[in-house]
Amino acid sequence: MVWRPASDGLVTVEALIQAVRNQPDTVNDSATVLLELERLRQGLRAAQDQDTPFSWLIEHGSVTSALVWERRGGHP
C-alpha cells in the first residue's frame, strides 16, 4: 500500500466532484456518487487538518486477503 498526503486525495476527489456536477449523466445515480465523493472529501479534509496520510484501498466484492490486512496493520 502506498500512503500519500491527504492533499493529494483532495485534488482528485474535488476534480471528480466537479466532473460529475458538470456531466451527471456519465455515471449511474449521480446524486449518490456526489454524496459519497463529498464524504470522501470531508474525511480527507479531516486527515489533512491532522497531517495524516491516506491510502486508497479499493475492494471488489466482499473478499479481502491476509496481505491487505497485514499492510493495513489490522485484522478483519
Image (spheres, helix red, strand yellow):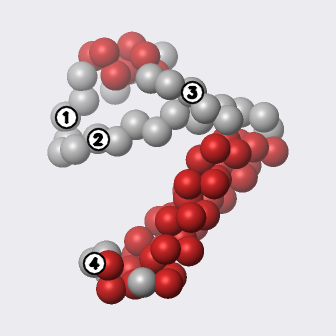
**Residue bearing the label numbered 4:** 28
Q: Is mark 1 on a helix, strand or loop?
A: loop
The Cα–Cα distance between marks 4 and 2, rounded to whole angstroms, is 19 Å
Would you say the residues marked 2 and 3 are in contact, meaning their CB atoms lie under 8 Å apart? no
Mark 4 vs mark 2: give the one in front.
4
Q: Image quarter for residue 51?
A: top right
* Mark earlier in primary sequence (3, 4): 3
The Cα–Cα distance between marks 2 and 3, rounded to whole angstroms, is 17 Å
Kindly identify the amino acid type of the residue bearing the numbered disc 1: Val
Q: Nearer the viewer, residue 46 or 9?
A: 9
The Cα–Cα distance between marks 2 and 1, rounded to whole angstroms, is 8 Å
Kindly identify the amino acid type of the residue bearing the numbered disc 2: Glu
**Residue bearing the label numbered 1:** 63
Count of marks, rendered view: 4
**Residue bearing the label numbered 3:** 3
Residue 33: x %, y % from top left: 41, 71
Identify which residue is drawn at 81% across, 45% down.
49
Mark 2, other Cα within 10 Å: few <14 / some 14–19 / many ≥20:
few
**Residue bearing the label numbered 2:** 59
